[in-house]
Every structure is written in C-alpha cells, then in structure tokens.
Amino acid sequence: MRISCLAVSLTLAAVALAQDVSIHAVEKAFNAADIPTDLEIVFKPTALLEVSLPQATGRPITLHAGINVPRNDTAGPPIFHAVGDVGRGPFVVATVDPDALTPQDPTVAQIRHFLGGNFFNKGGLLVNSTPAISDFLQPTPPAGSDPHRYIFLLFKQSPQFATQTLINSSSSIEFFNISQFASAVDLGNPIAGTFMRVAPPPS
Ligand SMILES: *[C@@H]1O[C@H](CO)[C@@H](O)[C@H](O)[C@H]1NC(C)=O
Ligand SMILES: *[C@@H]1O[C@H](CO)[C@@H](O)[C@H](O)[C@H]1NC(C)=O
Ligand SMILES: *[C@@H]1O[C@H](CO)[C@@H](O)[C@H](O)[C@H]1NC(C)=O
C-alpha cells in the first residue's frame, strides 16, 4: 500500500516536472513541428527556456517542447526561467500562435499571446522590471479546430527594443509577425524557446 502510493506520487511528480532538458531535443521538436518555417525564424537555441503554468490546485505545469496541455490548465500567467549561460539580461519574451483561426487556415495569424521586455536573470528566474507590452492571453482555439501551437521565444534584448513604436499595448494582437518584429527591432534570432499544443475544450 505504502509502496504503491509512493510509486504513484513519484510518477505524478515525474509527469509534472517533465521539462525540457536537452537543447538539441527542443531544436528537433521545433523542426518536426515546422515552427522555424512557419514563423520564418532561424532557431538554433543555445539555452533552454522553461515555461511554467501555475494551476489553481496542485503543482504548476512545466512545458516541454510539443506537450499537449488542456485548455483549462493554460490560464497562466506563465513563469519563465532560463537554463544555461545566458547572462544577466535584459531579455525579451514573445509568445505567438501561428495557427489562428485553424492550422489549415491561419488567416489571422500570428496571434500575439505575450510580448514583454526588460526581463532580467535572477538565478535563472526571469523577472521583468517593466509591464509587458502584451499581457499573457490564455489560448482559446475555436471549437472544431485542431490543436494550435503556442510558441514561446526568448531573445536578447536590443537597445532598439526600448524605443520601438511598432507595437504597444493597444496594437491589435492579430496579424503579428515575430520574424518581422525581431528584425525591425534588431533582436536577432531567439536564443531559446519551447512550445505547447492546446486543443479546444471538449464541448
Ligand atoms: C474548464 O473551466 C470551465 C470554467 O472554469 C469549467 O466550466 C469547465 O468545467 C472546465 N472543464 C474541464 C474539462 O475541466
Ligand atoms: C499605439 O500605436 C498606434 C499605432 O502606431 C498609435 O496610433 C497609438 O497612438 C499608440 N498608442 C499608445 C498608447 O502609444
Ligand atoms: C513576416 O516577416 C518576414 C520577415 O520580415 C517576411 O519575410 C514574411 O513575408 C512575413 N510574413 C508574412 C506572413 O507577412
């Protein structure tokens, strides 16, 4: 009895803590999901971006690249950690959905689900010192859609980011182009990332 309870809780812990541990595996998962092609980015990560979604009850869900997360568990806001030698910051984090309204018909993509800068590395935890430009928006794939990809990217912040006027908190979140934004603001290529898949809630 004791032993089986322990085995169950160890299994649950392993599931809850199944974060990305290999940069190479993350890069492979991005390629397998066509993310560099669809976002028109170069994805050669040099670190890991750990994204945790707090839960009303129980442990946060920490993503690993490609994980399926029930929509109800995605309220966030996410907590970000950098794993690896990324320096002190500042950093920019962007989250986009390239599959809106559906993966087959992404007519309003990308949706900008988060965009924030001035993240600093506090022992791995990324803490932002200014409000996000776009606060985290919970995934809401429409009924009948296949799962959408929600992609989190970490960039080293450029000086131009602080003075950019392309996107502000009242800009539409539709028709975002992370490649174009990163290029216009001189962010370079992302240094880390991960992603989840979220299906519409069962009706
Ligand atoms: C998801 O959340 C909504 C609103 O909080 C609730 O009504 C619904 O029962 C939840 N669904 C599942 C599958 O947990
Ligand atoms: C946000 O950007 C739009 C378009 O560039 C601009 O018209 C608007 O004044 C800006 N709003 C704020 C609060 O800066
Ligand atoms: C997004 O931006 C990239 C780089 O600027 C550009 O090549 C591409 O055509 C844009 N994609 C869309 C869908 O506008």
Image (cartoon, rainbow, N blue to C red):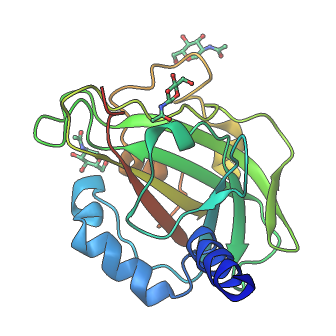
Q: Is residue 43 above or below residue 75?
A: below
Q: Quadrant of residue 110?
A: top left
Q: Residue at x 32, y 29 (%)?
A: 175
Where ligand 3 lies, by quadrant? top left
Q: Dividing the image into 4 quarters, which one contains the C terminus?
A: top left
**Horizontal arrangement in the rendering, residue 165 relative to residue 66 (left or right):** right
Q: Nearer the viewer, residue 93 or 22?
A: 22
Q: Residue at x 32, y 42 (%)?
A: 199
Q: Residue at x 70, y 47 (%)?
A: 117
Q: Is residue 19 above or below residue 183?
A: below
Image position, residue 148 (x, y; %) = 30, 45
Q: Residue at x 83, y 54 (%)?
A: 127
Q: Nearer the viewer, residue 41 or 32?
A: 32
Q: Is residue 13 above or below residue 95?
A: below
In the displayed orientation, state which residue is furthest to the left: 104
Residue 45 seen in the current view: yes
Residue 190 seen in the current view: no
Q: Nearer the viewer, residue 197 or 152?
A: 197
